[in-house]
C-alpha cells in the first residue's frame, strides 16, 4: 500500500510537471513565432531591408531610405498589429470562457460592433481623438455588453439566447456605423474600410501608447485571473465550490475584456474574427495542458501580423487585414455552427 | 482528523425570484456523520443543499459554519473547509483525469503560491481512495458514467475539506455504480471522519447508508433523525404520498420501504 501510494504520488507529480512543461514550451514556441512574424514584417515588404539596417533604424540611427520605410511605414504597422492582435486574442478567449461558448466572442455578439460605432461617432461627428475616443468606445462597448446580457436574461442567461440576441444587436449596430460613415464630412475610402472590416493601414507609433496601457492594465488583470477562469470552465457551481467568487470574477473579467476590445477597435477597427478565432486555435494546440489566455493572445498577434502581411504583399491586389482574417474566420464560423448544433460545443 | 467543523442551518428561507422554496429550516448537521436529504420531487432538497453550500443566497436566516455565516465568509476560505460536488459539473473538452482531480487544489493556492508536495499528496490520496489512479492519463470524455462520478468525487476529495456536500451523486448511475459511490462515501467517512451531506433519490439506499435522514416536504423539514426514526410508514406516506410498508432489511437491519401501488399486491396490507 505504501509503495502504491509512493508510485501514485510520483505519477501525479510527473503528470503535473509534464503539463506545465508542455504548456511553457508551447507558450515559448508561440512567442517565437510571433517574433518571427514581427521581424519579417520589418525586414521584407515591397523591398528587402537587411536585418542589420532594420536594427540600426530601431536603435535610432538615420539611414537614407531605410529610416522612412522601416521607421515610418513598417514599424508602426508591426507594433500596432502585435498589440491589437494580443488584445483581441485575450479578450476573445475571456468572453468565450466566461460564457462557455466559442460563439460568444465579442466580435460575434456585438461588443466589438458597439465599440466601433462609438469610435466612429466620436471621431467623425464629435471630432474627438486619442484617449477620449478610447473612453467613449469603452463605455459603449460596456453598454452593449450590458444590454445584450439584460435582453437575454430570463432566470439566468443561457449561452444560446445570448448569442442569438448578440448577433441581432451586432447587425443593428453595424448599420449604425455605415450610417455614420455616410453622414461624415470627411468621408474617405480608407476610413470606411478601417471601420467596417478593420485595418492597420493608417497605423502610427503614437497609437501604440493607449494600446500598451490597455494591455498592461486589462490584459494584466486577466492574466492574474487566469487560474480562476480555468476553474470557471467547469461550470459556475464547481467554480464556486472551489472557492471562486463567480459573479465578481465574471464581471471584472468581462469588463477588462471589453476594455481590451474597445481600445483596440478605436484604433484599427474591428479586425474580423481575430477575437473569435484565437481561443479555439489555442485550445486545439494546448489540448488542456494549461491556461488558454496567454497562448490565445499570441495567436491573436500572429493572426493580425500574418493576415496583414498576406493582405499587403502576397495577393494580386492589396487588402486590409480584416478582409484576410474575415476570409479565414468565415469557414470556421460555419463549421462551428454545424458542430455546436450537433453536439453542443464548449470551450 | 479529529477536528470537527460544525454546520448549522438557522431559520433559513430561500427561493428564486418571488417563489419561496425553503421555509424556516433549522438543522444541526451531526459532525462526522453521513446525513441524507430525502423527499419528493421539488420539495426543496437540492435548494437546501445549494444554500448550505453557498450556491444560493438565503432570503432569511443563515447557514453557520463554526458559528460564522458562510455567506459572509471569503469564498476561498470557505472552500478549504466545505466541499461540494454539484449535480452537473462540466469537464472542459479533452481534460485528463489527473488534471481534473488536481484542480481540487484550487482553494489552497493564493495568487502566486507554488505547487508543493502537499498538493501532490492530496491528489494521490484522492485518486487512490476513489480507485481512479489507473485512469489518471485518460480523458474524462472516454470514461463510463460510474468512473466519471468517481473522478469528480476525487476532485472534491483533493480539496481536503472536512465537510463534503453532494447533490444527487448517484442519479445517472446504474445500481452497481450507485453502490460503488455510496461505499466510497462510507470509506471516506470512516477513514477520514469527513462529515457528509447528500441528496439521495433512492429511499432504501438512503436508509442503509446514512446515519441521519432529513425528510423534506414542501420546503420544510418534516422529520429529522436516524433512519429508524424517519423511515416509518406514517412519515413516508406523508412525505411522498405513498402507501407503503416498512420492513427490516434482512441484510443490514435497517428499515426498508416497500411501496404499495394499485396492482400486483397479493397479500393484504
Image: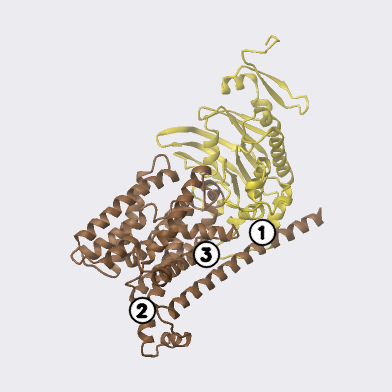
Chain colours: A brown, B yellow
Q: Position of residue A237 (x, y in %)?
A: 53, 46
CA distance separating discs 2 and 3: 28 Å
Going by the picture, which residue comes out furthest to the left? A185
Label tally: 3
The residue labelled by disc 1 is B119
Compared across the picture, whether A23 is left or right of A280 comes to right
Return the residue nearer the eye: B13 or A78. Answer: A78
Viewer-nearest of discs 2 and 3? 2
Q: Position of residue A116 (x, y in %)?
A: 31, 60
Residue A40 in view (yes/no): yes
Q: In the rendered structure, find residue A73 and report the number of the disc placed on it.
A: 2
Secondary structure state at the residue bearing disc 3: helix
Q: Position of residue A160 (x, y in %)?
A: 43, 44
Return the residue nearer the eye: A243 or B29. Answer: A243
Q: Position of residue A36 (x, y in %)?
A: 50, 75
Query: Could you tell which of marks 2 and 3 lies nearer the N-terminus?
Result: 2
Secondary structure state at the residue bearing disc 2: helix
Secondary structure state at the residue bearing disc 1: helix
Return the residue nearer the eye: A10 or A164. Answer: A164
The residue labelled by disc 3 is A295
Graded by Cα atoms within 10 Å as few (under 14), some (14 to 19) or many (20 or more), the crowding at tag 1 reads many
**Location of residue A55 (image quadrant):** bottom left
Residue B4 in view (yes/no): no
A62, above or below A170, in the image:
below
Q: Residue at x 61, y 55 (%)?
A: B103
B34, above or below B100, in the image:
above
> Do marks 2 and 3 share a chain?
yes
Dividing the image into 4 quarters, which one contains the C terminus of chain B?
A: top right
Amino acid at each position: 500500500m505504501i509503495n502504491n501510494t509512493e508510485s501514485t504520488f510520483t505519477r501525479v507529480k510527473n503528470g503535473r510537471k509534464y503539463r506545465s512543461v508542455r504548456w511553457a514550451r508551447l507558450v515559448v514556441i508561440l512567442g517565437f513565432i510571433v517574433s518571427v512574424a514581427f521581424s519579417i514584417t520589418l525586414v521584407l515588404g515591397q523591398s528587402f531591408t537587411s536585418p542589420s539596417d532594420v536594427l540600426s533604424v530601431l536603435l535610432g540611427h538615420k539611414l537614407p531610405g531605410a529610416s522612412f520605410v522601416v521607421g515610418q511605414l513598417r514599424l508602426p504597422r508591426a507594433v500596432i498589429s502585435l498589440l491589437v492582435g494580443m488584445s483581441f486574442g485575450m479578450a476573445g478567449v475571456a468572453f468565450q470562457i466566461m460564457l462557455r461558448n466559442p460563439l460568444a466572442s465579442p466580435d460575434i455578439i456585438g461588443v466589438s460592433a458597439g465599440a466601433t460605432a462609438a469610435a466612429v461617432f466620436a471621431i467623425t461627428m464629435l471630432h474627438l481623438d486619442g484617449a477620449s475616443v478610447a473612453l467613449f468606445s469603452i463605455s459603449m462597448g460596456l453598454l452593449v455588453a450590458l444590454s445584450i446580457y439584460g435582453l437575454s436574461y430570463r432566470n439566468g442567461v443561457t449561452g444560446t439566447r445570448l448569442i442569438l440576441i448578440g448577433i441581432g444587436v451586432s447587425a443593428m449596430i453595424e448599420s449604425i456605423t455605415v450610417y455614420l460613415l455616410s453622414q461624415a464630412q470627411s468621408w474617405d475610402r480608407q476610413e470606411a474600410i478601417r471601420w467596417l472590416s478593420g485595418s492597420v493601414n493608417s497605423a502610427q507609433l503614437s497609437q501604440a501608447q493607449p494600446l500598451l496601457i490597455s494591455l498592461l492594465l486589462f490584459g494584466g488583470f486577466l492574466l492574474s485571473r487566469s487560474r480562476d477562469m480555468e476553474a470557471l470552465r467547469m461550470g459556475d457551481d464547481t467554480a464556486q465550490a472551489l472557492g471562486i467568487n463567480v459573479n465578481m470574477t465574471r464581471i471584472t473579467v468581462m469588463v477588462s475584456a471589453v476594455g481590451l476590445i474597445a481600445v483596440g477597435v478605436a484604433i484599427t477597427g474591428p479586425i474580423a474574427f481575430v477575437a473569435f478565432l484565437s481561443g479555439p486555435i489555442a485550445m486545439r494546440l494546448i489540448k488542456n495542458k494549461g491556461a488558454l489566455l496567454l497562448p490565445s493572445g499570441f495567436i491573436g498577434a500572429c493572426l493580425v501580423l500574418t493576415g496583414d502581411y498576406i493582405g499587403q504583399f502576397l495577393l494580386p491586389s492589396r487588402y486590409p487585414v480584416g478582409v484576410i482574417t474575415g476570409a479565414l474566420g468565415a469557414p470556421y464560423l460555419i463549421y462551428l455552427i454545424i458542430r455546436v448544433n450537433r453536439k453542443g460545443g464548449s470551450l | 482528523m479529529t477536528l470537527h467543523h460544525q454546520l448549522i442551518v438557522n431559520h433559513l428561507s430561500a427561493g428564486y425570484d418571488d417563489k419561496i422554496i425553503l421555509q424556516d429550516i433549522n438543522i444541526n448537521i451531526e459532525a462526522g456523520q453521513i446525513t441524507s436529504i430525502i423527499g419528493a420531487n421539488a420539495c426543496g432538497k437540492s435548494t437546501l443543499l445549494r444554500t448550505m453550500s453557498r450556491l444560493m443566497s438565503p432570503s432569511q436566516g443563515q447557514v453557520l459554519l463554526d458559528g460564522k455565516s458562510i455567506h459572509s465568509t471569503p469564498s476561498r476560505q470557505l472552500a478549504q473547509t466545505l466541499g461540494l460536488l454539484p449535480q452537473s459539473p462540466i469537464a472542459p473538452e479533452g481534460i485528463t483525469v489527473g488534471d481534473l482531480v488536481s484542480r481540487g487544489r484550487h482553494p489552497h493556492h493564493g495568487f502566486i503560491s507554488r505547487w508543493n508536495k502537499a498538493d501532490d499528496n492530496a491528489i494521490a490520496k484522492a485518486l487512490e481512495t476513489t480507485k481512479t489512479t489507473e485512469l489518471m492519463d485518460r480523458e474524462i470524455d472516454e470514461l463510463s458514467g460510474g468512473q466519471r462520478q468517481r473522478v469528480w468525487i476525487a476532485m472534491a476529495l483533493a480539496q481536503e475539506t472536512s465537510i463534503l456536500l453532494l447533490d444527487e451523486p448517484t442519479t445517472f448511475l446504474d445500481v452497481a455504480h450507485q453502490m460503488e459511490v455510496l461505499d466510497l462515501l462510507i470509506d471516506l467517512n470512516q477513514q477520514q471522519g469527513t462529515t457528509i451531506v447528500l441528496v439521495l433519490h433512492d429511499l432504501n439506499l438512503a436508509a442503509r447508508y446514512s446515519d441521519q435522514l432529513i425528510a423534506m416536504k414542501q420546503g420544510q423539514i418534516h422529520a429529522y433523525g436516524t433512519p429508524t426514526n424517519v423511515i416509518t410508514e406514517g412519515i413516508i406516506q406523508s412525505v411522498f404520498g405513498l402507501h407503503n410498508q416498512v420492513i427490516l432489511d434482512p441484510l443490514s437491519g435497517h428499515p426498508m420501504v416497500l411501496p404499495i401501488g394499485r396492482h400486483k399486491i397479493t397479500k393484504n396490507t
